[in-house]
Image: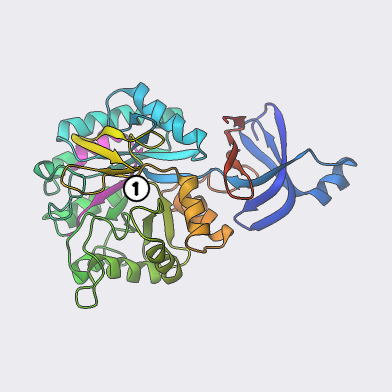
């Protein structure tokens, strides 16, 4: 256990083991030292616990995020990427994978190298490379002119630039060379995600476990054909794999990318296999206007980001907003929604020190009110907001 100042935080604590209605979290330095019920605390200290602060959640974990508050992760400006991470930290996402999007290969390699340094510092939890090995038909906000088949040389360049900090890569399984590239990424410890795909059911399903290397579906329902009973496609294939506990599905819970009924359907179909994400971009936390996502210009109107062709271009919400959506709009129990935004994504991308409030883990916590609105954020044992 790290030495340092001691902080006692009392509240209704939500952990992976359940809800403790009145508990005290003891923080020593950057880590959680103990989590005890108020009764146990009184028995040990012979005095009342500290002032009750509200509901305390584990720090949220966003594994698909491209920026926020006017700042981008797809940049070679380390200061800008740092500012994007800081915004989401203050909003409760204490662990963020910095996402880059399709760009010229040299640009993507340079962006990964910059983000690697922030990962070493602990500013970001790692990197998510979305592209350039995606479908032109389902490119969404990605520049279709820059989409390519998996290139072994580029795969190796990205891995070298990341130096073990590339956590997720999204690819379309129908691209020529997908299988070899997926195996190369997986052998290097990278989670292979499939998305932005126009593959049919069989091809998409074959990319996922147990025979395929992919274990994650990128923002299910978005960047793929809609579910249809005569053309089940990637949505059905991804849900089947998740139901068989061979994959997990990302779900953008901003209330824009998918309707709440679809969210309820996904959570009910594959409980315990859903990861809430923001897919946030530069405009998150900002007013309507023009922004950038990779090389594309994005216009935000009424909080919805779109490229000129009309495709939604990432999200403008925070992960705490997505958690509220899952609870209030999809009817998900609080513990399940919290798991989808904390312990499940942390486990899937291999972040052992975050995602729950247990002794020895980083002291990352979000204090919220009864409506799940932000009150304060604790990151690495220090208050941010």
Q: Is residue 189 left or right of residue 233?
A: right
For the residue pair 133 and 158, the one nearer the viewer reads as 133
Residue at 19% in and 67% down? 203
In the image, residue 118 above or below residue 52: above
- Find residue 212 and report its image quarter: bottom left
Say which element carries label 1: loop
Residue 110 in picture, x, y percent from top left: 23, 28
Q: How many marks?
A: 1
Q: Is residue 245 left or right of residue 35?
A: left
Residue 80 in picture, x, y percent from top left: 35, 24
Q: How many residues crowd mark 1 within 10 Å: few (<14), some (14–19), many (20+)?
A: some
What residue does disc 1 label? 189
View extreme (left): residue: 145
Where's the C terminus, which quadrant? top right
For the residue pair 205 and 383, the one nearer the viewer reads as 383
Residue 14 in picture, x, y percent from top left: 63, 52
In the image, residue 292 above or below residue 272: above
Check residue 158 for magenta coloring: yes
Span colored in magenta: 155-173
For the residue pair 13 and 216, the one nearer the viewer reads as 13
Residue 108 visible in the current orientation: yes
Residue 123 visible in the current orientation: no
Q: Is residue 122 left or right of residue 224?
A: right
- Find residue 382 and report its image quarter: top right
Residue at 43% in and 39% down? 96
Residue at 51% in and 52% down? 324
């Amino acid at each position: 256990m790290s030495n340092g100042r001691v902080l006692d935080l009392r509240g209704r604590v939500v952990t992976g083991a359940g809800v403790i209605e009145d508990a005290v979290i003891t923080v020593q330095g950057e880590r959680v030292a103990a989590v005890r019920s108020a009764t146990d605390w009184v028995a040990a200290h012979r005095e009342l616990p500290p002032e009750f602060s509200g509901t305390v959640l584990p720090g949220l974990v966003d594994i698909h995020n491209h920026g926020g508050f006017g700042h981008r992760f797809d940049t070679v400006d380390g200061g800008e990427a740092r500012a994007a991470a800081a915004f989401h930290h203050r909003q409760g996402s204490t662990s963020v994978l910095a996402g880059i999007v399709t760009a010229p290969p040299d640009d993507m390699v340079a962006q990964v190298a910059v983000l690697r340094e922030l990962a070493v510092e602990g500013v970001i939890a790692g990197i998510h490379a979305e592209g350039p090995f995606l479908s032109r038909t389902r490119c969404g906000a990605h520049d279709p002119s820059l989409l390519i088949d998996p290139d072994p040389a580029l795969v190796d360049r990205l891995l070298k630039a990341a130096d073990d900090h590339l956590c997720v890569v999204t690819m379309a399984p129908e691209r020529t060379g997908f299988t070899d590239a997926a195996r190369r990424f997986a052998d290097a410890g990278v989670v292979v995600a499939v998305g932005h795909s126009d593959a049919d059911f069989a091809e998409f399903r074959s990319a996922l476990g147990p025979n395929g290397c992919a274990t994650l579906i990128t923002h299910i329902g978005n960047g793929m054909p809609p579910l249809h009973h005569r053309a089940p496609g990637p949505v059905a294939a991804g849900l089947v794999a998740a139901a068989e506990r061979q994959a997990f599905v990302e779900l953008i819970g901003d209330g824009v990318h998918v309707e709440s009924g679809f969210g309820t359907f996904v959570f009910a179909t594959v409980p315990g296999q859903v990861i809430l994400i923001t897919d946030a971009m530069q405009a998150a936390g900002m007013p309507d206007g023009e922004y950038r996502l990779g090389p594309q210009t994005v216009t935000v109107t009424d909080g919805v980001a779109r490229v000129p062709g009309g495709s939604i271009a990432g999200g403008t919400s925070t992960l705490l907003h997505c958690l509220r959506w899952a609870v209030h709009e999809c009817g998900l129990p609080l513990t399940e929604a919290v798991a989808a935004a904390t312990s499940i994504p942390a486990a899937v991308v291999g972040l052992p020190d975050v995602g729950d409030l247990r002794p020895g883990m980083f002291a990352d916590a979000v204090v919220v009110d009864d409506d799940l609105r932000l009150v304060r954020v604790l990151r690495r044992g220090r208050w941010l907001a």
